[in-house]
Every structure is written in structure tokens, then in C-alpha cells.
Amino acid sequence: MDNGIRIETPRLVLRRMMLDDAPALLDMLSDERVIKFLPMFALADAQEARAFIERKFLVRYARADAGERDASGCPLDLRYAVCLKGDAGAAGRLIGYIQIGEDEAHDFGYAYVRDAWGHGYASEAARAVVAHAREAGMPFLTATHDELNPASGHVMRACGMEYRYSYRERWMPKDYDVVFRMYQIDFAPDVPTYRGYWDRYTEHWV
């Protein structure tokens, strides 16, 4: 690991996202099957891909490099391009991204190109980022998945997260009802279950 900027696993390199990644990101996030369970519509062109990288990654990196941290004192730059390892361990082809949000939920999320599905890459990257979040002092992480996307729940369990509750949300910007399953992993003692979604949405259950 390199100060949170680069993480290596047996098959992957996790590094900072760059504007040069826009073409690969456009290929991934213009695929309707890839974005089906993401809170966004398909990217239309390279300009939208660059704007996505700027908004979701580069702004956070700049704030982190300036010394800013989130409300719990944790890094803002725990968000990575996920690349297959190339020659001599160099970062090769981009196959997805993985990130931890800076909000109070410490929400953990990811997306991958279709031909990377089913190879264990998502779980491999998730375990590495969860381990780094623990080392960085995060008190806990949460993650949610649409109940119609059980493969994402498998990734959450593979990195040690536990199911806590479900809730129904009118999901934006796609504007339809979704039942989400909320998972959590605790790094500090006596961390309570994050109740933000439970309190926000009237339909919730275990």
C-alpha cells in the first residue's frame, strides 16, 4: 500500500482514477447492464465521463492532498480505479472502481465492466479496501444492495460485512421503488448499527 493512493492484491492494482481513464470509464458506464443497479443513468459521451471522474474522484483527491478529512477524521481519498495487473505488477486495463463515501454512513460501493463479473475481482478488491479502511481508522463501513442484485451481497459478505436490515426507498434519479439490504462491518468496539436509512424510510425490517 502507498499512503492510500495505491493498493496491490494478487491480481489487481488499485490506484487513483485519472482523466485519462475517461474512455475506459465511458465504455463501462454506458453499458445499461452495468449501470442497472447504480444510482445514475448511462454516460453519453467522453465529456460526461470526464465530468464523472472530476466530481467523484479528482475533487476528493485534491481535498485529501490539502489535508482535509471527513467528519470522523478519516481520509477522503479511499476511492480507486481497479486495474488488472500488467507486466511486472504495473497497473493494466481498468475494469472498475471502488470507493468509500465521506458521509456519516461511510458507504462502500463499486462497479465493474461486464467481462470482469464472475471472476472474484470485486471481492478481491473489496477485501483490500476494507482492510485499508480499518488501518486508516474508519469506525465502520456500510454498504447496500438492491435485493434483485444478490451478487453484490455476496461481495459484501466476502469482505466480512454482515446483514443488518432492509428498507424500501424511492430511488433517485431513476424514480422507482427499491428494496435495499444494508450491510455493515465494525472496526471499533461497541459500534451501533447505522440507523440512517432505518430512520429515513418508513418501510424497514430485519
Image (tube, grey):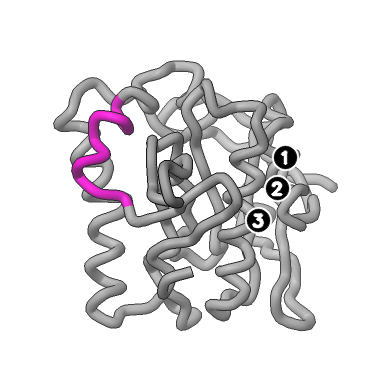
Which residue is farthest front?
88
Given contact means CB atoms under 8 Å apart, are the residues at marks 2 and 1 in contact?
Answer: yes
Q: Name the chief secondary structure element in magenta.
A: helix
Q: Which residue lies at the image location 38% right of the left edge and 40% below the top edge?
A: 92
Label number found at residue 127: 3
19 inside magenta stretch:
yes
Q: Residue furthest top?
A: 32
Instruction: Pick the residue in front: 39 or 7.
Output: 7
The residue drawn where x is 60% and y is 27% is 117
Label 2: which residue?
Answer: 156
Q: Are marks 2 and 3 in contact (CB under 8 Å)?
A: no
Looking at the rendered structure, the kind of residue marked 1 is Gly
User: Residue 162 is drawn in which quadrant?
Assistant: bottom right
Q: CA distance from mark 3 to mark 1?
A: 14 Å
Task: Name the front one of labels 2 and 3.
Answer: 3
Q: Secondary structure at mark 3?
A: helix
- Residue 61 placement: quadrant: bottom left
Q: CA distance from mark 2 to mark 1?
A: 5 Å
Q: Position of residue 143 (x, y in %)?
A: 63, 51
Where does the magenta region start and end?
A: 17-26
Q: Secondary structure at mark 2?
A: helix
The three-letter amino acid code for the residue at tag 3 is Arg
